[in-house]
Amino acid sequence: MKTKKLKYTPEFNFNLLGISSAVDDYKLSWHLSEIFGVEFKRSPDLEIIDSRFSDFQIFSIYETEDENLGNRIKIVSNKGAAGFLIDELKNIDYFIIIYDCENKDFLDKLIVKLKSISGISAVFRLNPENLKSREKLLF
């Protein structure tokens, strides 16, 4: 049988922030709702099958679509009961994925506002292309 190989190079067309925080996911989504003036809603959990674990890895997701700014924003937990979404970033508790945002000033202001929230210890700007398990962020 003849086989064909497909070459697929995923595009990471989003901005990625990492948050180190002791705040629960629903409280973080509430704080971000206050910052943006929009409502973050709980989405169905992200379930990943990993051969290292006997069960699914489950991660919570909150998201909103901000029509005023024209971007879609997701809050994704990095820690689940069966491990981490991105193993090499164990110091990160949550990821904020911002789609359709080319405004660098918006990201800089967001980072400043996030750092002002009590319970958030650190905010990191990340490049998804530098992560080993970056494909897990494509959902």
Image: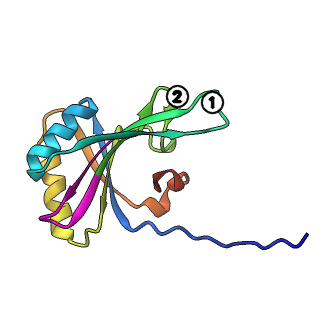
The three-letter code of the residue at mark 2 reads Ala
Name the residue rendered at 21%, 70% in the picture: 104
Q: Nearer the viewer, residue 62 or 129?
A: 62
Residue 118 on image: x %, y %: 13, 34
Identity of the amino acid at label 1? Phe
The picture quadrant where one finds residue 30 is: top left
The correct choice, above or below, for 80 with respect to 12 in the image is: above
Of residues 19 and 37, which is closer to you in this image?
A: 37
Disc 1: CA contacts within 10 A as few (<14), some (14-19) or many (>=20): few
x and y percent of residue 99 in the render? Answer: 31, 63
Q: Residue at x 26, y 29 (%)?
A: 24
Quarter in which the N terminus is drawn: bottom right
Is 36 inside the magenta-drawn segment?
A: no
Residue at the (45%, 31%) spot, across then down: 80
**Residue 105 in sight in this render:** yes
Q: Is residue 108 left or right of residue 21?
A: left
Q: Disc 1 on helix, strand or loop? A: loop
State the residue position of label 2: 82
Height in image: 62 above or below 2?
Answer: above
How many numbered marks does the figure carry? 2
Residue 87: percent from left, percent from top: 51, 41
Q: Main secondary structure of the magenta part?
A: strand
Q: Is residue 81 left or right of residue 107?
A: right
Indicate whether 24 appears above or below 135: above
> Looking at the rendered structure, which numbered label has been put on residue 53?
1
Position of 25 compared to 119: left or right?
A: right
Disc 1 + disc 2, Cβ < 8 Å: yes
